[in-house]
Image (cartoon, rainbow, N blue to C red):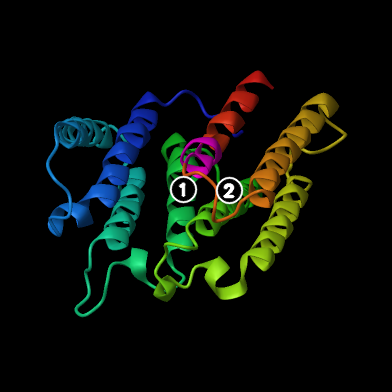
Amino acid sequence: MFHIPEDKPLANFAFFGTIVGYNFVKYDSLARTNTIRIRLSLKLIVLFSAFSFLATGFYFFQLQGLTQMVSIGFLLLTLLYTLPFFPNRKNARNWAGVKIYIVSLCWVGVTLILPILDSGIAITADFYLKSIQRFILVFTLILVFEILDLANDDPHLKTVPQQIGVKRTKILGYILLLIFCALELLNSNFTFNGDIQYSLLSLLLIFAIAIVVALFLAFANEKRSKYYTSFWVESVPILWWLLLVLV
């Protein structure tokens, strides 16, 4: 979107760092409370995560200094999400209403802020525009997860569906998606004085992704299979990437 030259160190840092972060968030609390048995599959996950951790460190030292400092900030945010840093407080994942904002912010940081910083290109209004769009999209995707998890989530988590109900959560998601699409009209690339075809394709792509997410949101309910989110909803960013490549 910003015509950044290929940056393999950052791409690999994001890839391996995501593996480490995801597995740490998923398995750390279970391991510390001894609620899981050390099966062969889990040992393989630990081994793969250890390799990914070394790879993350290797590529970290190939990044620009500013990118390194900001990435450490997002690392601390991930640790805060998982580990109880403060006395008599649970980790941020269990703080009332906070989880959805931390996850969305981390997504924006790794997929947008770090690439822009490491490339050294100028930060323009489009950067802030895309940051808001990315945050809105991920936030809306997480709403689908929260609807499906409504029956199992601790009431103290105060997720969006717990606070305003499923129907209003879906309405909120639709409104956010409308804002997501409208913001694209403010993009500097969207101008009929330039490449009309490029502008229209970019806008159509944004609408296509918004429609897909809206459909997932519309059909979300507590009785859906876990694969509804863990496979189909999780695949939305991959679909977006594929459409970007084709366009």
Q: Residue, x 20% and y 54% (percent of image)?
A: 30
Left or right: residue 42 versus residue 4 is left
Residue on which disc 2 sits: 134
Relative vertical location of residue 33 with respect to residue 198 in this rendering, above or below: below
- Label whose residue precedes the other's in the sequence (1 or 2): 1
Percent x, y of residue 3: 58, 28
Quarter of the image containing the C terminus? top right
Image quadrant in which you'd find residue 55: top left
Percent x, y of residue 200: 82, 31
Relative vertical location of residue 82 with respect to residue 183 in this rendering, above or below: below
Label 2 neighbour load within 10 Å: few <14, some 14-19, many 20+:
many
Report the magenta residues as a range. 227-234
Residue on which disc 1 sits: 107
Residue 229 part of the magenta-drawn span: yes
Q: Nearer the viewer, residue 23 or 135?
A: 23
Percent x, y of residue 86: 22, 75
Relative vertical location of residue 104 with respect to residue 154 in this rendering, above or below: above
